[in-house]
Image: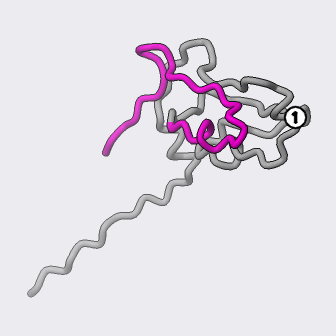
Amino acid sequence: MSAQPKTPQVDNDSMEDRLYTVKYNDPGDSHLDVKVSDICVQCDSYDCVRVCPANVWRESEEGVPHIAYENCLECSSCRYACSHDNVVWTYPETGAGVTFKHG
């Protein structure tokens, strides 16, 4: 009798479920912001919103994105995507920020 190869298990959790497992130690202040609000109001591409994998940057009626910094994965995609160089992005204070679970 030959042994059947094991089929690898595939994790079918949604992206939202996966993001929920990321632990974040809130420093109390956002490490994200915009430099000049008027630039965002005039922006028609919202690249910072479109590129964020964790839905941190969200369009708002005022034209300046709402920032849910607590969801940030610290990938810094937003600052590179903004063609106006209008994103303030710094690492959270030491000991704060995201902790990834491997495995």
Q: Which residues are magenta?
A: 75-103
Residue 96 located left or right of residue 15: left
Closer-to-camera residue (16/98): 98
Q: Residue furthest left?
A: 1
Residue 61 located left or right of residue 76: right
Total numbered badges shown on the rendered structure: 1
Residue 83 located left or right of residue 96: right
Name the residue: 41% across, 15% down. Answer: 95
Name the residue: 47% across, 28% down. Answer: 98
- The residue pinned by badge 1 equals 41
User: Where 89 falls versus 6 (above or below)?
Assistant: above
Res 32 quadrant in image:
top right
Closer-to-camera residue (89/62): 89
Magenta run includes residue 51 = no
Residue 33: where, in percent of width, then height?
Answer: 69, 24
Res 38 quadrant in image:
top right
Could you tell me which secondary element the residue under label 1 belongs to? helix
Residue 76: where, in percent of width, then height?
Answer: 54, 36
Residue 5: where, in percent of width, then height?
Answer: 20, 77
Magenta run includes residue 102 = yes
User: Which of the image's four quarters has the N terminus?
Assistant: bottom left
At label 1, the amino acid type is Val
